[in-house]
Image (cartoon, rainbow, N blue to C red):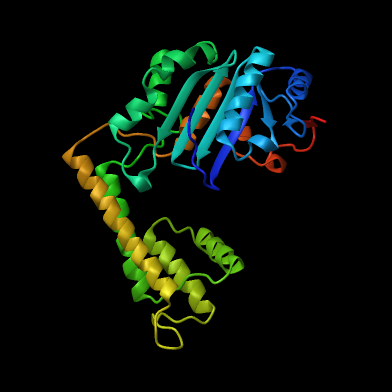
Amino acid sequence: MTRYPSFSSASLTLHVRCDDQRRVVDALQRLGRVGAVAGPLRRRWITVFDPRAEFDDGERSRLAKVLSAALECLTLIVSCLKYGRLGIDLFRDGAQAVEYLLDLDYVRGDPSPEKCDRAAEGVAERLLPFCRPGTASVHLDRLLRALEVSSGAMEGSADDLERRAAEREDMARMWHERGLHLPTSIDEAMTWVSAVRDSGAHDVTGVVEALERIQRAEGHTGTGVDASGERSRQDESFARSMRLEADEFRRRAAALRETPRPLRASCADDVLSDLCSLLELDVEVTEHDALHDMPGYPNGFVQVV
């Protein structure tokens, strides 16, 4: 059983491949799952919510197993820690048929070929029978290893990482030289974002110049000091974080040049999107683990009583 990360940015959802919502509700009722909710059919899957399984990995897996046995169909647990990690657990006839956990968390270190390949070892062969007709085994294997995604968004090459490092360094330097400051409210932040977007800025210099214009218009000069003569701690922290990011990008670029390896997808969400397409699962229902956030809720959702 995949052990999922407990972060607020992680979504964990349970789906049943069944075209009859009533059958799913009746099965949940027979299993004593009062309070559970079955969503409407979307493509080939029905999403199930059970309060008892919401924060319990073991209970969620037990529910997936018993539902797959009771309905004689596939059940699927999807976990996605935004951008970094993807977990897939597929059950059939009361037993786990597929277990997959991909880690592309670049914050905690580069996704090594060994780590990605271990995650995908043998998974394509086990998952292929449940994919839509015409799915190529080679393509599925490359997708599971994060070597190929339809979006084309791959991690940066060494040159790209060096470019991103230079951008962070330029931002830190200009932030200090021009005395820019961070927004103090959501409304102010949204106003600045709109101003930058309207300016048509396409590089760091353009973004900084747009921010400088709007901050000057609000009465902030480019002195780099506040009324007490000291730079804001938050502003200094932001500039420091830009420099630290630049250092990390340069470290990763150096590692890539020292030991060249295939580039992997830059985002686990892209792998999930392609897998959902192959499994004929609407990716939109995997993005929310709160019932009231589900697309179309409450229309078409049925609760077990």
Residue at point 61% right, 67% down? 187
Q: Kindly identify the residue that appears in the image at 63 percent across and 33 percent down.
A: 285
Residue 164 spot, x, y in % from top left: 32, 52
Judge from the rendering whether residue 286 lies leftward or rightward of residue 179; answer left or right: right
Residue at the image position 34 percent from the left and 26 percent from the top: 118
Q: From this viewpoint, which residue is outermost toward the left?
A: 258
Residue 216 in picture, x, y percent from top left: 49, 78
The quadrant in which the C terminus is found is top right
Within the image, what quadrant is residue 194 found in? bottom right
Height in image: 248 above or below 299?
below
Where is residue 286 shown, x and y percent of the image?
Answer: 59, 34
View extreme (bottom): residue = 228
Q: Position of residue 11 (x, y in %)?
A: 57, 39
Closer-to-camera residue (232/49) = 49
Q: Is residue 35 visible?
A: yes
Q: Is residue 128 left or right of residue 145?
A: right
- The answer to whether residue 281 is seen in the rendering is no
Eyeballing the image, is 226 above or below 106? below
User: Closest to the observer: 255 or 207?
Assistant: 255
Task: Give me the residue at 60% from left, 31% from top.
Answer: 60
User: Left or right of 149: which side holds 113?
Assistant: left
How many numbered tags mark residues here? Answer: 0
